[in-house]
Amino acid sequence: MNERDFINDQLSTEKYITASYNVAMNEASNQNLYNDLAAIFKETQDCQRDMFNLMFKKGWYSLEAADQQKLQQSYQQFNGYKNQLPYGG
């Protein structure tokens, strides 16, 4: 396993772990437990972000540039949804 594969595996694992902590936080009924989970979630999320930044810096994780017209269409679409929400827009 090369460095890229190893870090990619770690990144995938961290993404899974942060998603799991998010679910646990949503379901925690005890405030102290929630606070502990939130602290661990933050550490895990920061680790995930550091790995993403490392892979991006090394050119191992690339993003496709968004088309400006598609961005504007998406913005207009979701801005319209916002007006439909019961708690205001």
Image (spheres, rainbow, N blue to C red):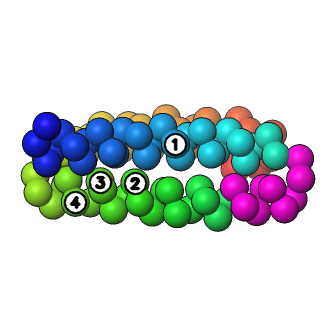
Give how far apart the Cα atoms at labels 4 and 3 are.
5 Å
Give how far apart the Cα atoms at labels 2 and 4 are.
10 Å
- Does the CB distance between marks 4 and 3 fall below 8 Å? yes
Secondary structure category for the residue under label 1 = helix
Q: Residue at x 36, y 39 (%)?
A: 12
Secondary structure category for the residue under label 2 = helix
* Magenta stretch: helix, strand or loop mostly: helix
Camera-near label (1 vs 4) is: 1
- Quarter residue 6 falls in: top left
Q: Is residue 82 visible?
A: no
Q: Position of residue 16 (x, y in %)?
A: 48, 37
Which residue in the structure is indicated by mark 4? Answer: 54
Left or right of 56? Residue 50 is: right
Q: Amino acid at mark 1?
A: Ile
Precedes in sequence: disc 1 or disc 2: 1
Which residue in the structure is indicated by mark 3? Answer: 52
- Does the CB distance between marks 2 and 3 fall below 8 Å? yes
Q: Amino acid at mark 3?
A: Phe
Q: Position of residue 20 (x, y in %)?
A: 60, 39
- Does the CB distance between marks 1 and 3 fall below 8 Å? no
Q: Amino acid at mark 2?
A: Gln
Secondary structure category for the residue under label 4 = helix
Which residue in the structure is indicated by mark 1? Answer: 17
Q: Residues within 10 Å of mark 3 (few under 14, many from 20)?
A: some
Precedes in sequence: disc 2 or disc 4: 2
Q: Amino acid at mark 4?
A: Leu
Q: Position of residue 46 (x, y in %)?
A: 45, 63
Give how far apart the Cα atoms at labels 2 and 3 are.
6 Å
